[in-house]
Image (cartoon, rainbow, N blue to C red):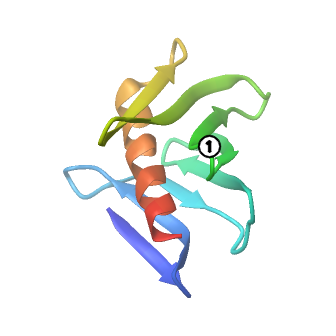
Amino acid sequence: MSVEVMLGIPKRMDVIDGAGEQVAHLHSPPFTVIKDKVNVAFASGEELQLQGTIIENDYAVRDSHGNLRIHITQKWVTVRDRDTVDVADGQRPEVAFALAWAIDRWVERD
């Protein structure tokens, strides 16, 4: 995975598969205060929008029609985090897990 950082705030991130091919490109406005909005463009041409809150660690990924495709939630459980990833029918689970990981890295850098 490659990450481009400007002033400590990542604005772009590419998700790369094991063969080195770009699977998805994440892009966000440079400054957001409470709500994160991230556009996700896949190599296939499909585009989704991820929106959520840094404070609650709760993210919804929607398609261009507003349909919920993936829901990512992170909760503290004792000393460790627990992520829940709900995936809609027809959405590839491996893509959902890659997005969950990418967003976790994105938030850690903020």
**Which quarter of the picture shows residue 16?**
bottom left
Q: Residue lying furthest right in this view?
A: 65
Q: Is residue 46 visible?
A: no
Compared with 19, 46 (above or below) is above
Which class describes the residues within 10 Å of circle 1: few (<14), some (14-19), or many (20+)? few
Q: Is residue 38 visible?
A: yes
* Point 59% across, 49% down: residue: 40
* Point 20% across, 52% down: residue: 19
Percent across and percent down for residue 55 are 63, 50
Percent across and percent down for residue 66 are 78, 28
Percent across and percent down for residue 52 are 67, 44
* Point 61% across, 39% down: residue: 59
Tag 1, which secondary structure? loop
Q: Residue lying furthest front in this view?
A: 78
Compared with 100, 6 (above or below) is below
Q: Nearer the viewer, residue 31 or 64?
A: 31
Q: Residue lying furthest top in this view?
A: 89
* Point 28% across, 49% down: residue: 17
Compared with 15, 10 (above or below) is below
Q: Report the residue marked by disc 1.
A: 56
Residue type at mark 1 is Glu
Q: Nearer the viewer, residue 24 or 55?
A: 55
Q: Nearer the viewer, residue 44 or 72?
A: 72
**Which quarter of the picture shows residue 38?**
bottom right
The C terminus lies in quadrant: bottom right
Compared with 4, 59 (above or below) is above
The N terminus lies in quadrant: bottom left
Percent across and percent down for residue 13 are 47, 64
Say left or right for 104 vs 21. Answer: right
